[in-house]
Structure formats: C-alpha cells, structure tokens
Amino acid sequence: MEHVHLAVEEDDLYSGYNDYNPTFDSEELENDVGFQQAVRTSHGRRPPMTAKFPGTPIGPRSLATSFGARLHMASSMGRPMTGAVQDGSARPMTAVRAAGYTSALSRGSAFDPLGQSRGPAPALEAKNEDTPEEKIKILEKKVNDLIEESCMAQSMGALQVALEKAKEAGRKERALVRQREQSGSADHINLDLTYSVLLNLANQYTNNEMYPEALNSYQIIVKNKMFSNAGRLKVNMANIYFKQKNYPKAIKFYRMALDQITNAHKEMRIKIMQNIGVVFICMGQYTDAITSFEHIMSESPNIKTGFNLILCYYAIGDRERMKKAFQKLISVPLGIDDEDKYIPSNEDTSSNMVIEAIKNDKLHQMERDLKTLAEKYIMTAAKLIAPAIETLFATGFDWCVDMVKSSQYVELANDLEINKAITYLRQKDFNQVEAVETLKAFEKKDSRVKSAAATNLSFLYFLEKDYDQADRYADLAMNADRYNPAALINKGNTVFVKQEYEKAAEFYKEALRNDSSCTEGLYNLGLTYKRLNRLEEALDCFLKLHAILRNSSQVMYQLASLYELLENPEQAIEWLMQVISVTPTDAQALAKLGELHDGEGDKSQAFQYYYESFRYFPSNIDVIEWLGAYYIETQFCEKAIQYFERATLIQPTQVKWQLMVASCYRRSGNSQKALETYKEIHRKFPENVECLRFLVRLCTDMQLKEVQDYATKLKKVEKMKEIREQRIKSGREGSARSRREGRESSAGSAGISTPVLISPKKSSVMDEVKAVSQSESKHFSPLLDSGRDSGRSSSSTKGERLSAKMRSLPGSNEPYEASSPKELDASYVDPLGPQMDRPKTGVKKRVEDDDFADEELGDDLLPE
C-alpha cells in the first residue's frame, strides 16, 4: 500500500488572484477606527515591527482590517513586507497611492489632481508692522534705498544731492541702531550696513571737497576693529592729504595702507607704490621717487611708471639712465592683439559678422586708447630727452628714432623724424638745412607720411615768404592726400598772397568739406570774403566760427570790425565789449572802443577806453596823440605834456612832439620852461625854422640878449630854405614843360593844347609849422599788421581824429602876441599833412605758436 497513491483534489491554478493584502486598501482608511486612532496618537509614530527573516510574517499576530477579518501578512510570492529587515537595514515606508489616480473614479468622483474644486485659498494674514522686527526691517530697507539714491545722484553729477542723501542715510542708520538696542537685539546689529553708510558719507564729503569731514568719517571706519579690511581706506585718506598738498602725511598713510595689504593683492600694492613715487616727485625728492618707480618697473612695468621714471632721471640729469629708462619704456608690453584680426576675410561670412560686431566695441576702443596713450608718452619722452642725452639735439633725436625702429612701435619712427623737423620750426630755426632735408626725405615715403611732411615744408617756406616753394609743396601734399585739410589751407594761403581771392576761397571751402571742424579754414574763408568786400558772407562765416569757438577774442574782434564796416557801430561796440570781457588787457580792443565812442560823440566814454588802452600799452602813438589833444581841448595843457613827452621817447627823431611839449609849456604860462625846451630842440635840430621863430619871439618878449643871434640864424635858415625850394620848383617846372611839349607835339596836327592846371595852395593856420620839419621828418608807411583790420572807410567820418582846438602860433611876418586869438588843428602833429589811417594792431590768429602771415592767414600745419 505504500506504493499506492490516492488521487486527491488538485489545487485551483487561478485562485488567489482576487485576494489582496488589506494593508494596501486605502479607500476605507477614513472609516478605519484603528488607523485614525494611530494617526491621532503616538501609536502611529512607533517604529515598525521587523521580521527576523525576510519572507516570513512577523508572528502569529494578525492585522485587523476594516472588514473585521484577520489575515496573516505573509506574501504568497515570498516578497518581504515593507519595513522588514533586509540586508541588515530598515527600508523606509513608501507611498502606495499614485498622485491623482485612485479607484474613486469608478465611484463617481471627478478627476481633480490640483484640488481646484475646493475653492480659492484663504486670504493671507496681514503683517503686523507694529512689531519691533518689522519696524527694523522697514528701516533697514529705507537706509539701503538712501545709499543707492546717493550713489545714483553722484553718478549724474548732483554732488550736493548725493551728500544730503548720504547724511540722511547716516541719520536713519543711527536710529536703526537705537531701535535694536531698545528691542534687546543689540547683538544682531548689521555691521555691513553701518560700514556702507559711513563709506558712502566719506566719499560724498570727498566729492564735495569737504576734506576735514571726509577724514573724520574715514577715521571712524579705520579705528573700528569690527570692520575687516578697513585699513585699505587709508589709501583714500592719503589721496585727500595729497589734494590738500600735505605730502608728508600722504606718504605716511600710503605706507600704512601698503603695510596692511598682503602680497596676494599685487596690483593694488603696485598702484599704491606708484602714488608714493608721484608724491615724492611733488616734493622734489627725485631719488626716493626713482626707487619706487624702479621697483614697479621690475615687478609689473607699465607705460605711466616708465614715463615718470624718465622724468625723474631728466630732473637729476642722468643721461645714461635716461637712455635705459627709454629702452624700458618702449619695451613695456601692452597686451593688445594685432589689428589684423579685425580685418574681415572674404571666405567666412559668419566670422566677418563677428568681426564687424567687435570692431568698434568698448574693448577695442579701450585697446586703441591704450595704444594712443603709449604713443603719446613715447613721443613726449623722446622730445624731452633728445636734447639732454647728447650734446646736439639732432644726435639725441636720431638715437631715439633708432631705438623706436627696433621696438614694437616701428610706425612711430616716421612721426618722430617729422617732429624733429617741427621742433626746429618751433625754435624759430627756419634756416636749418637739417630740418628741410629731414622733411624732404619723406617725399618717397608712403602717402600719409609724404602728405604730412610736404604740409610742414609748405608752411615752412610760407613763413620764409618763399611763396613759390610753399605753393610747390602744397601741391605735393594735395597730390599725396587730397583729403588733407591742412594741405588745402596751405594752398589757399599761397593763392591768397597772390591776391587771387576767389581761388583761395575755393580751396578753403574744399578744406571745410573734407573736415567740417577745420576752424582755420572757416576763419580764412571769412577773411577772404572780407577782402572781396562780401561783408555779409564774411559775417556769416565768423558767426558760425563763434558758435564753435565761444571764447575766441580774434573771432569776436573780426565780428566787431565787420559790423563797423557795415556802419553798425552799436553792434561793433557790443562785440568789442565781449572781447575785453575775455581779454581785459587787450590795449588795441580798448583803443578801438575809444575810437567808436569818439565817433558817436561820447567823449567821456572814449577818454575812459583810451586811457585804459594807454595804461596797458603806453607806446601806441595814436592813443598818445588822442589823449594829448583831449587834454589840450579841455584846457589841461599841463597833463598833455606827459603824453607828448612819451611820444618824444618813442619817436625821438620827430620834432613835432618836442614842439608840442614846448607849446604846452608856453600855453600854461611857463615861458622859462618853454624857452629851455625850444633851446634844446634847436640844439638837436639846428635847421628847424619853426623852433628858431619861437626862440626869436620868446627872447623878444622876455627882452633877452640872445634874440639877435637867433634872428641871424633864422635868416640864414630861411634863405637856405628858399634856395632849396627854388631848385625844387625849377626842376618841377622843367619836367612839366617837357611833358607839355611832348603832349603838344603829339597833338600838334589837331591844334590841341593841353593846359596846365595848377591847384591853388590850401591855406592853413599851421602851414608854417607843417612846412618847417619836412626835411627832418621821416614818413613811415603804415604797417600791415596781420592781426586786425582797422575797419575804417574813406567815406565815413566817424573814425576821424579828434580835432582839438589850440591857439595858433603867429606867422613869421606877424608880431608876437602871447594871447593870439587864432586857433590851429591838433593834426599839425604830422608835418607832411593829414596822416593815413593806420590799421590797428590786434590779437593775431595763433597757429602752432606762429602768427598768420599777411592778414590773419594761417592754418594748423604743425601737428602736436
């Protein structure tokens, strides 16, 4: 029977699939009393029971479900239950319910994973701002806002507003500290906020040049040990002492700051040492400055330090070290990429777009500025040390050029050689063959250098008045670079001196088309229109120029001159008043104002301006003459004497001024002084007839014994004068007769005779005085000054001289009378007749330390 197997009922293969662990039934948990009790009490927070072996139930204990049945928790597949011990570690509880996916859908509930069906969220509870914590937060925010507003105002240039905001931030911050102390949270004071407030306040004091207050604010920060790295602010304090020119204290604080900055901040230490070197230069301690700069050049060389080192060596006169420092300067690396990378290639379109985008960005602009600054320092250093490193200026400059050619600044070599020639020009050394040869050597160079050299050569020859050579090199400069405004202006100048004003105007216009900011071209164009008598166009040019050069006295004077020519003296006076507001010591502008007021009939105002002009420039004959005549007219002959004596010193060979001095003594009743003056005049000019006549009359009136001697001398001089006049008259008649006979012979066939018209001699009270010194007087042609035009018109009488009435001297055939009722014109000061209107000297247009040739012509031909 043991081999007999009884058939038993087979197990159902599909049983157990609908059975599930009631632990996973989460739908009825809300109604499960045991579960809810466990949630509300600490029962649910107890650690779960662990099984000894995986896959086995916890024990004979069963878990109650909502159905009231008790089932064992063992898995039919041998899966360890959640929370059971596995591999020696407890596995955390896991969620058994998927988010948003529940079997409740089948029971009629809507799908609402976000819980929107529950309505809006309840309103947030309003903050209670009455609490100390909220008040402190609000106050902190106000302080931060004030600091930000202060910084923004300072960046926009509103320094006073920035300071007020900084002060208000300081007051708010102190109130914040007090509030923290009252609330018992003094340990939580925001030190960063306090530091920001004090630093901003100190900076705003510095910006407003309130240096003592700024130093006090910095001292508060520096002395507070709670602020980390506050010692760096001693650099700011040193900067303030430097501005106050308290150099010893500045060095002290720079060194204190240097001691508190570690070697990790190398760049900051270098900058502080550079400041120390600059302060030593200001103190004249060049040896100490050299020590600082040499250390910087060995550690981290830069262009500014190298240039300062050259200055120090130049100050102590060390030639060899100057050369070494110059070599160090030109070897300083700039860290700038090659310009070739900005040249677009025709192959890659995308890279070309990138190159176009970065060609003018801020980084490239910074690189260009750095390169320009380096070139400026190198050029300045070369011009400075060239005369000092060698006995000859040219030799030193050649050494500098050779050094530059072997450096990274090869393109500066040509500019240095041009500057060498320009330096000769600035030294007024025009005849130096070396300067000319240096510039001529560039005729075979590239177009830019050739144009610059030819432009300077043209200007050089123009200053020497070699207009043909100036014209030749101006053409050469234009051919090399037609868009060079300086070359076009030079060409216009050479045409101007040939009086071809229309062509000159065209060249000036072309220069303005190439460079609208070329003020020299606009100035010269206005002068050209003035010469062409196109006054309205000239006025338009100078008004445009005045809009560009607001404080140019030359431009304002030209405007005044044009308004005077346009017969608008009120506007002329207004522009001249602007001239003297810019240059109050301009004697010529003051004299012109006096002339205009005199023409308007305002003698007192004219006297004021003439007197001011004489005070600043006491050698102007026209001003001296007017002042002397004014005092004679107002019956103050004693005051007129000093002016005529001044004229005598200026023109000692002109007898008229000495006669006027004697005449003033005679009119004031000082006969003895007048007699001595006439005797002195006779000693200097023994053949002066008028002086002898007055000596005879004075001696007769004073009953002196010398009267007979002077009378004899007077007769001899008059006889010699008559003989001389007869010879001149006979010579004139002979030449007139020969011309008349020639005309009669040519017109003899027609029977025409040409009458000779002899104009009658004009009678004048002072004919005798005017005829006296014709042989002695020297007539000077009026100077054509290049500064200002006189602006006088032949038809206008407003600019004529003051005709002061003085008592005339009696003729030779009249008896001497001390109180002769006759009057004479003060213009008798010119023995040759009425003087020509002299063009007024004025402020000249300045171009690279050289005046305009002819009438204010000039151009910017000497580049800086």
Image: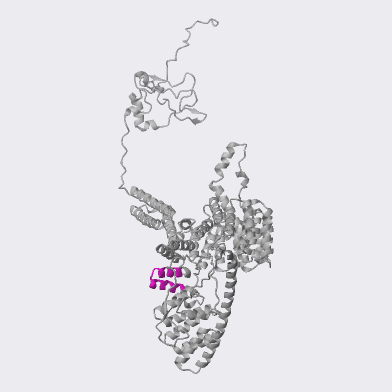
Q: Residue at x 47, y 82 (%)?
A: 661
The quadrant of the image that shows the C terminus is bottom right
Residue 150 rendering spot, x and y as whole percentages: 40, 54
**Main SS class of the magenta portion in the image:** helix
The correct choice, above or below, for 479 with respect to 309 in the image is above
Camera sees residue 294 = no
Please say whether residue 50 is one of the residues in the magenta stretch: no
Depth check: give the residue in front, 754 or 674.
Answer: 754
The correct choice, above or below, for 150 with respect to 654 in the image is above
Drawn side of residue 347 relative to residue 558, left or right = right
The correct choice, above or below, for 491 with respect to 825 in the image is above
Specify the segment rendered in magenta.
590-613
Residue 431 rendering spot, x and y as whole percentages: 66, 66
Residue 529 rendering spot, x and y as whole percentages: 50, 57
Residue 615 rendering spot, x and y as whole percentages: 46, 74
Camera sees residue 177 = yes
Depth check: give the residue in front, 484 or 127.
Answer: 484
Residue that protrudes farthest toward the bottom in the picture: 705
Q: Residue at x 52, y 29 (%)?
A: 87
Depth check: give the residue in front, 413 or 105.
Answer: 413
